[in-house]
Image (cartoon, grey):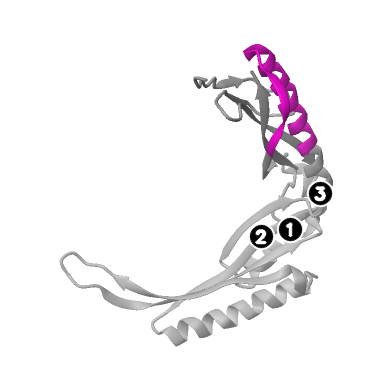
Amino acid sequence: MPMFRLPVLFAAPLIALPAAAQVVLTAPVPTLTLSAEGRSLRTPDLAEMSGGVVTTAPTAQGAMTENATKMTAVVAAIRRAGIAERDIQTAGISLQPQYRYDQNQPPVLTGYQASNTVTLRLRKLADVGRLLDTLVSVGANQLNGPNFRVDNDAAALDEARLQAVATVKARADLYAKATGVKIKRVLSITEQQGYEGRPQPMMAMRAKMEADTPVAPGEVTLSVTVTMSFEVEP
């Protein structure tokens, strides 16, 4: 039997992003493959961020010593803020030589740069802005985040899965009818998960943090893209 392919793009409903369909009729197993994305909105209850210290000095020992002194103060401040030990983790320590480059001249060593970074998980979102300010006040000069997440996301992901599967099944029936084939059985199911932040106005937490750096957790979108292949009968 000759093989033909029918790629299709369509506008998805609110619960899914644009999906793609492909019908392949060829011996021995004719298939219909579809993908769709389901989404679930949640209010985050966990913030992930990183902070650290970068120092430079003429010698490697000097850079590391200064960095250790400042980083000790940063970690102490983190612990005083009530962050649990399980939520503090060293992300990386590095020491790199620094060079000056002049035209038509060999590189000249000018000193060394040391860095030390820790990653944090904060379970009290109202403390995020205050902690950022505290870290800077004790010597941190490298900050990243926060990234807001849902600590226990199983139920939200299952909700997104159900939406994606429902969309795929509905589209499978539609395209099977449009191409004159019948759905026989599911051959495979694969998925890919994702997180997406949805910011809200900064006023969301300003009342609690007063003069602290304003941070708004907003909402996060948990998504699951499901791809299903069906065996079809011509």
61, above or below 199, in the image: below
| Of pointers 2 and 3, the one earlier in the residue sequence | 2
Q: Amino acid at mark 2?
A: Met
As measured in the structure, the alpha-carbon distance from the residue carrying label 3 to the one carrying label 1 is 25 Å
* Image coordinates for residue 221, horizontal then vertical, percent: 72, 40
Q: Are marks 2 and 1 in contact (CB under 8 Å)?
A: yes
Q: Dot 3, crowdedness within 10 Å: few (<14), some or many (≥20)? A: few
What residue is drawn where x is 73% and y is 33%? Answer: 164
Q: Is residue 42 left or right of residue 141?
A: right
Q: Position of residue 25 (x, y in %)?
A: 57, 23
Side (left or right) of 57 relative to 25 = left
**Res 228 visible:** yes
Q: Position of residue 49 (x, y in %)?
A: 66, 60
* Residue named by callout 1: 128
Magenta segment range?
Answer: 160-188
Mark 3 lies on a secondary structure that is helix
Question: For numbered disc 2, what is the local secondary structure?
Answer: strand
Question: What residue sits right under mark 2 in the picture?
Answer: 49
* Local secondary structure at mark 1: helix
Q: Is residue 225 visible?
A: no
Alpha carbons under labels 2 and 3: distance apart: 22 Å
Residue found at x 78% / y 59%: 127
